[in-house]
Each structure stands twice: as structure tokens, then as C-alpha cells.
Image (cartoon, rainbow, N blue to C red):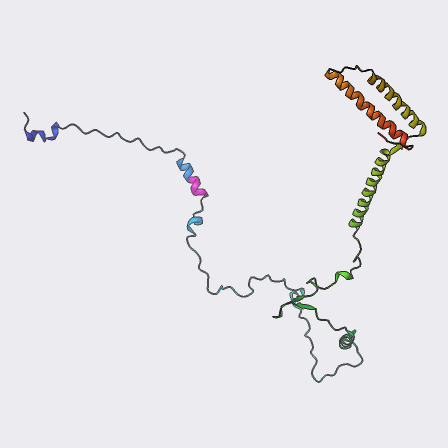
Amino acid sequence: MATPSAQMDGRDLPPRPEKPAKPARYISKFRPFVKHEAEKNKSRWKTMGPAKVAVPSPKDFLQKHSKEPKLPPRKKEQNSKKPPALSVPRRTDRPVMGIQSKKNFINTNAVAAIRGVPKKPQPFCVDTRQGDKYLLETSGLAPKYIKKKDYGVTPKYVARRNEERKRAKEEYEASILEDLKKKAMKKLSDEERTNVLQALKKNWQETQREYLGLSVVIDTMHKKMHKQRLELKLKELEQDIQALEMHEDVYIANE
């Protein structure tokens, strides 16, 4: 048997597993070309600022009206010809008499002030005791609309609408009259009245003959109904004959 010291020796332990080697990292063959293009098109100062900034001089401060546009020099100044100096009259000099200006502004203003109409104050409307006021013209309280030329005149669209309404009413009344004429009662002449009366009497005689020809014994429903129908017809014929005989003027409706 192996001693404890022999067991602790490393020669009897199992070997450590070897780690597999990592493959080489992939590097594109276009890497140098891409790097060169990126460095070529990149402006370094856009992200980090310029390397050195020129400090402005104290003498180059912003002066007043320095940025305003300047007019080009005049032609007279370019020709180095100065305008003649204005001669100011002295206090002891007297004006030349007999020369008048085109317009006497003093007299004109005096006449305008004398003949002018004084300016009227604008009328106000005060609605509170604190003195709150507003213009009377725009308040709606001044009757300025009655001074208009077309005040009280019916507008054209209202007159046109009234004419259309009147025309529509006339057309409606004309159509109603026409319908009433069509549905008006017609008066029977004496000859037509006589003919109608004779026809009714003849019909009554035929119905009376049929009624008298009924059997004495009426024992069925059909016979009873036939008898009632004849009686009703005779009664209506009698009423019509009596109405025609009582009235000489008879009117009938046009269908």
C-alpha cells in the first residue's frame, strides 16, 4: 500500500485539461482603406474645437455705428471740390426792400384762423358715476342710421321675395278655382230630368213585379236575403222618385 506521503505527491494526480487556444480575431482586409477614408473626410476641429484661438486685440473693440452701411462718397467730394460756404447775414444788415416771397404764410395762417370753423368736441356717453365714458357714435345710442339715403326703403331681396310669394299665391288660387270649376255641380235640364224620372219609375215597376213574384212561403236563408234586397231597392227608388218630383231644379256632381 502507498504511504500518505506518496499520495500527496503530484505524480499520481490526473493531468489538468488543456484550454483550447482561441482563434485569431477576424480583421477585414478593407480596414486600412476605411480608416484612411474616415481620417480624410473628418474635420477634427468640429468636435474638439480649433487647436489655437486668436485672442482679439484690445484696440479692435466694437465702435458705435461701425456695422451700419456706409453710403458711397459724393461725386463732388471725389473731385475734391468743396461747396461754397453759406453766407449768414449779420445782425446789422438790413433786408432788401421791394422783394416779396411767393406766399405770405403769416397772413395766410391768420386768415385761416379767423375764418376757420372751431373744432367740435367728440360727444361722449357716461354710464357710471365714476366717470366711465365711451364714444356716443359707436355706442349705438345715437340715431345715425336714420340719416342714410336708403333709410326706410325696402331692400331689393325683400321686394323680390314678396313678389315671388304673391305670384305663388295667385297661382295656387287659380289652380283651386280651376279644380272647383271642374268639380262644380251640373244642372239637369227638363228633358234630362223627365228621362231620369221615367227610368226610375220603370226600374221601380220591374223591381215591384219581381217582388210580387216571390213565393208565399219563405223558409230558406237565400229567399229571406233576396226579399230584403228587393225591399231595400224599392225603398231607395221611391226616395229618388219623390225627390225628383218635389224639386224642379236638380244638380249633379261632375265626375
Magenta stretch encompasses residue 179? no
In depth, the one of 227 and 135 nearer the eye is 227
In depth, the one of 115 and 188 nearer the eye is 188
User: Going by the image, does 114 lie left or right of 83?
Assistant: right
Q: Position of residue 77 (x, y in %)?
A: 65, 66
Quadrant housing residue 107: bottom right
Q: Position of residue 138 (x, y in %)?
A: 69, 62
In depth, the one of 151 and 41 nearer the eye is 151
Q: Residue at x 84, y 25 (%)?
A: 237
- In the rendered image, the quadrant that contains the C terminus is top right
Quadrant housing residue 193: top right
Magenta stretch encompasses residue 40? yes
Magenta region, residue range: 36-41
- In the rendered image, the quadrant that contains the N terminus is top left
Q: Residue at x 78, y 50 (%)?
A: 158
Report the predominant secondary structure element of the magenta stretch: helix
* Above-or-below relation of 172 to 245: below
